[in-house]
Image: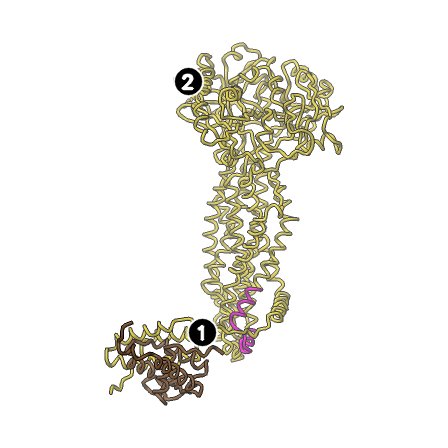
Chain colours: A brown, B yellow
C-alpha cells in the first residue's frame, strides 16, 4: 500500500478523529481543527484527507446520525483503527525523542 | 431555536449533484447544509447562500468528479452484426421507399459531382503550364468615341518592337490560329494549324512524346499532336515523315514532322493539333510586310520573370501605342496592358473578351446554376430520406420499446438509426458514382462536347474527399432528426398501447414537403422555359436565309467564273451569287460618319445576286445594279439597325462619309441580320458592291430539301476543276444548329431533373398523407358517426396539403421563372423567357398529379367503416 508517511494535515485530522470519539464527521472535524489551530480549514480538504486515511486503513467509517438540520441526510462517522492509533503513537514517539535530543543550551538561549 | 429550515437555492444543489461522485455526495452535502443552517442563523440567508456556493465550488475538483462507467458491458461486435441484420430486414420490408430514395439521392450526388467537375475545369484551367505565373498576354485598349474596350489582340509589328526594345520581356511569341490544306501521299486533309514563334514551346509546357520540342526553329518542321499523328500516319512513328501544304495558287510547301506532343486537356487555352513556325505565315501572306503591317491583329504572349519590372515594361509599351495611332487613325489604341496568363481564360469569358483566339473557360453562370441545382437536388433527396425514415421507423416502435426495457441506451438507438441512414447514403453514393460513369457523364459529354469531363480519381483526390464528406453530412442531416425523435419514446407508452403511432405531420415535415414541391416546380418551369425558348428561336427570323444556302471559298473572280459556269444547268439550284465577304464567314468593322456623328459598323463587300441568294430582304430602296460603276463606287445598302443608330427615319439618299473622304449614299435598307445568331447583339451592317475580280466566295441557294444534294453536286464539279484542292463548303445554319442543340440539351437536363424531383416529392406527399390518415383514424371514425359525409372527410384530410401545394407552387414558379430567365439571358442575347400561361400550366400539372396520388388513399380512408376504427377502445 501507500507509504506510512503521515502528512502534517493528515496527522491533525487523525488526532481530531481521536478527540471527537463517537462524533467524528466532516463538519465537526472542521470546527475542531479551526478551534485548535486557529486557521481556516476548507471542508473539501478535510473530506479528501478523511477518504485518504480510510484508504490507508487508519480510520474506518460507518453511516449514522441523520438530523433534520442536514435535510435528513446521514453523517459518515469515522473512528480510529488499530493501525491508526499505532501510527499516531509512532509519530508522537518520534517527535518526542527528537525534541528530547535538543541540548538545554538551545532552550536557555545560549550563544554559539 | 428556529423551527423553519430553509434550503440553499435548488440550482446550487443540482449543480453539486451533477458533478459530484454519487457515493459520497450525500454526506458531503449534509455537512454543507448543516454549516449553511448555522450561517443562516448568524449571518442571514444571503450571506449563507453565497458562502454555501463558495463551499460547493471548493469541491469542484477532479478528486470529487463522477467517474464514467469504467467498463461498458456492451458486446460491440455482436451488436454490430445485429444492427446489420436489422438494417437489411428493414430495407427489404420497405423496398419501394428505399429504392426511390436511393435513386433520388444518387441523382443528387451525380449532380454534385458534375458541378464539381465544371468547377474544377475552370480551377485547373491551364494548370499544366509551369511558367504560367510569369506569362502575360498583351492586350490593347482600343479607344473609340470615349469608350475603351480591352481586346485580346495587338498589332502585328508590336512583337518585333518588343523583342528588340524591351529587355525585361523574354520569350515573346505570336500566336495565329489558321487552317491549312495538307497532303500526305495522295490524301488530302484540312486541319487547323497554328503559327507560332519558336519561343512558344519554351513559354508553354508541352508533354513531348517523341522528337524534338524545339523543332520550330526549323521553318520546315512541324509539331503535331498525338491524335493528329495517329490520324495522319496510323501507328507508325511520325518523326521525319514528309507532309505537303497546298497553298492557294497551287504552291506546294514541303515539311517534315519534327515532334509529337501529347494533346492538352480540354481545359487548356491551346487546343491545337499542329504548330508551324510563324515565318511560314509571313511567307504565305506577303501583304503582312514581313510582320510590319499595323492593320494585322495577332495574339501576343511574353514572359516577365521579375514581377517588379511589370510597371517598367508597361511604360515601355506606351510609345508603341503612339506608333500605331500614327499609322492607323481608324483604330486608336490608348495603351497596351499586360494580362496575366493565370486566370486569363476565366476572365475572358466573363467579360466576353473581343478578339480572343484561345479556348475559353466555362462561364460563371453555368457553374453557379449547376451548383444551385445540385444543392437543391441534394436537399430534396435529403429531406425525402428524413420523411421516409420517420415513417418507416414508426413501424418499429415495439422494437424500440422492447430494447429500452431490456436495458438499451438511447445513445445506442440513435447510433443505430443514424447508422442505417448512413448506410442508405453510402449505397446511394455507390449507385450515384456508377450512374455517373456509365450514364450521366457520357450523356453530359454528349450534350456539351467541348467540355469532355472525365473522372480521374487518382488525380483528383479532393473529389473523393469532397464526396465522402458530403455523404457523411447528408447522412447526418437526414438521419439525426428521425433518430433523435424516435428514440425519445418511452417504453411504457409504446408497449401499453400498440396502436400508438408517430405523429404524422408537424411543422417540420410540412416545411420539408413544401420545399420539395417548390424545387420540383422550379425544375419543371426551367424545362418548359427552354422548350418555349427553343420554339421561339427556331421561328426567329435571322434576316437571311440559312436553311437553303451553302457557300464555298474561291481564290478570285476567275475561279468563281469557272465554277459558276460548271454549275449551270442544275435545276435544283435557285440562284448563284459571288461575293468578296459573306455574312457569318467574313466581314470587317470600320468607322463611318454622318453629319458629324461617328459610328462603328460591320461592312460586307458583295457581288451580283448576293441579296437574293443569301436571302436578305429589302424593305426600302433597291438592290445593286449589275456592273453599275456608280454602285461600285458610292452605293451602299444598310440594315435597319444602322438606320436606327443614326437616327434616320428615311434612310434613302443619306450620305455617309467613310475613311474621312469617301462619300457613300444609301440606296436601300434591308431587314436586320443577326450575323452572330441569337448569341450576341446584332451589329449595324453596311453592304457595298464590288466587281467580280474581287470575289472570294461562291454562294448557292436551293430549297432546304435539296441543299444537301446540291452540295454534293458542287463538290463533284469542284473536284473536276480543282483536283488538288479539298472542297470545303459550309452551310449557313451553323449558328442556329448550335442554338437548337443548346436548347435541346437544357430541356433534356431539366426535364430529367424535374421528373426525378417530382417523383421524390410525390412519394413524400404520399408518405405524409398515409401517416396523417393513420393518426387521424379515430377522429375520422368519430366524425363519421356524427354524420360527416365522405366529402367532408376528404376535405378535412386534404386541407393542409392543399395549402402546402399552393405555397410550394407559388414560391417554385416565381423562383423558377426568375432563375430560368437569368440563365437564358446569360446564354442567348435574343430569347423568350417563360410566360405566365406556361407557369400556370406547371402549377395545374403539379396539383393534378398530387391529387391523383393521394386521391385514392384519401377516398379509401374516408369510406372506412367507423366500427373498424373505433372498435378496439
Image coordinates for residue B590, horizontal then vertical, percent: 48, 20
| Image mark count | 2
Specify the label residue B66 is tagged with. 1
- Secondary structure under the numbered disc 2 in the rendered image: strand
Viewer-closest of B451 and A97: A97
Image coordinates for residue A48, horizontal then vertical, percent: 40, 77
Q: Is residue B18 visible?
A: yes
Considering the image in quadrants, where does the N terminus of chain B appear?
bottom left
Chain letter of the residue beneath label 2 in the structure image: B
Specify the segment rendered in magenta.
B398-419
- Magenta segment's dominant SS is helix
Specify the label residue B594 is tagged with. 2
Disc 1 to disc 2, C-alpha distance:
94 Å
* B416 part of magenta stretch: yes
Is circle 1 on the same chain as circle 2?
Answer: yes
Image coordinates for residue B807, horizontal then vertical, percent: 45, 55
Chain letter of the residue beneath label 1 in the structure image: B
Residue B180 left/right relative to B810: right
Image coordinates for residue A109, horizontal then vertical, percent: 26, 76
Specify the label residue B423 is tagged with. none
Residue A67 left/right relative to B151: left
Viewer-closest of B699 and B141: B141
Q: Earlier in the sequence, mark 1 or mark 2?
A: 1
Q: Height in image: B7 above or below B667?
A: below
Amino acid at each position: 500500500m501507500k507509504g506510512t508517511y503521515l502528512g502534517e494535515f493528515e496527522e491533525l485530522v487523525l488526532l481530531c478523529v481521536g478527540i471527537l470519539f463517537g462524533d467524528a464527521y466532516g463538519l465537526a472535524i472542521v470546527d475542531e481543527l479551526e478551534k485548535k489551530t486557529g486557521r481556516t480549514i476548507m471542508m473539501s480538504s478535510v473530506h479528501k484527507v478523511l477518504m485518504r486515511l480510510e484508504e490507508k486503513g487508519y480510520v474506518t467509517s460507518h453511516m449514522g446520525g441523520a438530523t433534520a438540520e442536514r435535510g435528513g441526510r446521514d453523517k459518515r462517522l469515522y473512528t480510529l483503527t488499530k493501525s491508526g492509533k499505532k501510527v499516531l503513537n509512532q509519530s508522537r514517539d518520534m517527535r518526542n525523542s527528537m525534541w528530547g535530543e535538543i541540548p538545554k543550551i538551545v532552550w536557555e538561549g545560549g550563544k554559539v | 431555536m428556529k423551527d423553519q429550515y430553509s434550503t440553499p437555492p435548488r440550482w446550487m444543489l443540482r449543480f453539486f449533484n451533477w458533478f459530484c461522485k454519487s457515493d459520497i455526495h450525500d454526506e458531503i452535502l449534509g455537512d454543507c447544509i448543516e454549516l449553511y443552517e448555522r450561517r443562516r442563523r448568524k449571518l442571514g440567508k444571503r450571506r449563507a447562500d453565497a458562502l454555501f456556493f463558495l463551499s460547493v465550488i471548493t469541491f469542484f475538483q477532479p478528486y470529487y468528479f463522477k467517474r464514467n462507467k469504467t467498463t461498458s458491458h456492451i458486446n460491440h461486435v455482436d451488436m454490430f452484426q445485429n444492427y446489420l441484420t436489422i438494417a437489411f430486414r428493414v430495407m427489404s420490408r420497405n423496398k419501394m421507399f428505399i429504392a426511390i430514395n436511393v435513386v433520388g439521392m444518387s441523382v443528387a450526388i451525380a449532380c454534385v459531382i458534375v458541378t464539381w467537375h465544371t468547377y474544377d475545369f475552370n480551377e485547373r484551367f491551364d494548370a499544366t503550364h509551369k511558367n504560367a505565373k510569369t506569362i502575360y498576354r498583351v492586350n490593347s485598349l482600343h479607344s473609340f468615341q470615349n469608350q475603351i474596350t480591352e481586346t485580346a489582340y495587338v498589332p502585328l509589328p508590336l512583337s518585333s518592337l518588343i523583342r528588340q526594345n524591351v529587355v525585361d520581356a523574354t520569350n515573346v511569341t505570336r500566336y495565329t490560329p489558321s487552317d491549312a490544306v495538307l497532303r500526305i501521299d495522295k490524301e488530302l486533309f484540312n486541319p487547323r494549324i497554328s503559327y507560332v514563334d519558336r519561343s512558344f514551346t519554351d513559354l508553354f509546357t508541352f508533354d513531348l512524346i517523341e522528337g524534338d520540342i524545339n523543332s520550330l526553329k526549323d521553318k520546315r518542321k512541324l509539331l503535331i499532336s498525338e491524335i493528329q499523328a495517329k490520324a495522319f500516319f496510323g501507328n507508325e512513328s511520325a518523326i521525319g515523315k514528309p507532309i505537303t501544304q497546298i497553298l492557294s495558287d497551287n504552291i506546294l510547301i514541303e515539311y517534315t514532322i519534327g515532334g509529337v506532343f501529347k494533346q492538352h486537356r480540354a481545359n487548356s487555352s491551346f487546343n491545337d493539333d499542329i504548330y508551324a513556325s510563324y515565318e511560314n505565315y509571313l511567307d504565305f501572306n506577303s501583304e503582312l510586310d514581313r510582320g510590319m503591317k499595323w492593320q494585322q491583329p495577332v495574339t501576343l504572349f511574353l514572359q516577365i520573370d521579375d514581377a517588379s519590372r511589370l510597371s517598367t515594361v508597361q511604360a515601355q509599351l506606351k510609345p508603341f501605342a503612339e506608333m500605331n495611332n500614327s499609322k492607323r487613325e481608324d483604330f486608336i489604341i490608348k495603351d497596351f496592358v499586360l494580362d496575366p496568363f493565370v486566370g486569363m481564360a476565366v476572365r475572358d469569358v466573363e467579360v466576353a473578351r473581343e478578339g480572343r483566339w484561345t479556348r475559353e473557360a466555362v462561364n460563371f453562370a453555368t457553374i453557379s446554376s449547376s451548383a444551385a441545382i445540385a444543392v437543391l437536388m441534394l436537399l430534396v433527396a435529403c429531406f425525402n430520406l428524413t420523411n421516409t425514415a420517420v415513417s418507416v421507423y414508426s413501424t418499429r416502435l415495439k422494437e424500440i420499446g422492447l430494447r429500452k426495457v431490456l436495458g438499451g441506451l438511447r445513445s445506442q438507438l440513435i447510433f443505430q438509426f443514424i447508422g442505417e441512414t448512413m448506410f442508405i447514403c453510402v449505397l446511394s453514393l455507390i449507385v450515384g458514382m456508377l450512374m455517373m460513369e456509365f450514364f450521366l457523364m457520357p450523356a453530359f459529354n454528349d450534350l456539351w462536347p467541348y467540355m469532355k469531363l472525365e473522372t480521374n480519381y487518382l488525380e483528383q483526390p479532393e473529389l473523393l474527399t469532397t464526396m465522402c464528406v458530403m455523404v457523411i453530412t447528408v447522412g447526418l442531416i437526414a438521419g439525426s432528426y428521425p433518430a433523435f425523435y424516435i428514440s425519445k419514446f418511452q417504453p411504457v407508452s409504446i408497449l401499453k398501447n400498440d396502436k400508438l403511432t408517430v405523429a404524422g405531420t408537424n411543422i417540420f415535415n410540412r416545411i420539408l414537403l413544401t420545399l420539395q414541391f417548390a424545387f420540383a416546380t422550379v425544375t419543371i418551369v426551367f424545362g418548359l422555359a427552354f422548350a418555349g425558348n427553343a420554339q421561339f428561336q427556331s421561328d426567329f427570323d435571322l434576316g437571311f436565309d440559312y436553311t437553303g444556302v451553302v457557300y464555298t471559298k474561291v481564290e478570285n473572280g476567275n475561279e468563281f467564273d469557272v465554277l459558276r459556269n460548271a454549275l449551270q444547268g442544275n435545276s435544283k439550284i435557285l440562284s448563284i451569287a459571288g461575293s468578296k465577304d459573306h455574312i457569318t464567314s467574313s466581314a470587317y468593322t470600320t468607322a463611318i460618319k454622318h453629319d458629324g456623328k461617328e459610328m462603328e459598323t460591320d461592312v460586307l463587300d458583295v457581288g451580283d445576286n448576293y441579296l437574293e441568294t443569301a436571302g436578305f430582304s429589302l424593305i426600302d430602296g433597291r438592290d445593286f445594279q449589275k456592273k453599275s460603276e456608280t454602285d461600285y463606287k458610292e452605293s451602299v445598302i444598310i440594315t435597319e439597325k444602322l438606320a436606327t443608330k443614326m437616327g434616320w427615319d428615311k434612310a434613302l439618299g443619306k450620305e455617309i462619309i467613310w475613311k474621312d473622304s469617301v462619300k457613300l449614299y444609301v440606296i436601300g435598307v434591308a431587314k436586320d441580320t443577326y450575323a452572330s445568331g441569337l448569341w450576341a447583339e446584332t451589329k449595324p451592317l453596311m453592304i457595298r458592291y464590288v466587281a467580280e475580280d474581287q470575289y472570294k466566295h461562291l454562294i448557292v441557294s436551293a430549297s432546304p430539301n435539296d441543299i444537301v444534294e446540291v452540295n454534293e453536286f458542287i463538290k463533284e464539279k469542284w473536284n473536276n476543276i480543282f483536283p488538288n484542292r479539298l472542297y470545303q463548303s459550309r452551310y449557313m445554319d451553323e449558328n442556329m444548329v448550335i442554338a437548337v442543340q443548346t436548347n435541346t440539351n437544357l430541356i433534356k437536363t431539366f426535364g430529367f431533373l424535374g421528373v426525378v424531383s417530382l417523383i421524390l416529392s410525390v412519394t413524400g406527399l404520399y408518405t405524409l398523407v398515409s401517416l396523417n390518415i393513420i393518426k387521424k383514424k379515430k377522429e375520422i371514425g368519430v366524425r363519421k358517426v356524427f354524420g360527416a359525409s365522405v366529402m367532408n372527410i376528404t376535405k378535412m384530410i386534404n386541407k393542409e396539403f392543399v395549402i402546402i401545394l399552393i405555397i410550394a407552387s407559388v414560391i417554385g414558379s416565381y423562383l423558377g421563372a426568375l432563375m430560368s430567365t437569368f440563365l437564358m439571358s446569360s446564354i442567348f442575347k435574343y430569347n423568350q423567357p417563360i410566360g405566365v400561361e406556361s407557369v400556370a400550366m406547371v402549377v395545374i400539372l403539379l396539383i393534378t398529379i398530387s391529387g391523383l396520388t393521394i386521391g385514392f388513399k384519401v377516398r379509401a380512408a374516408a369510406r372506412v367503416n367507423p366500427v373498424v376504427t373505433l372498435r378496439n377502445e
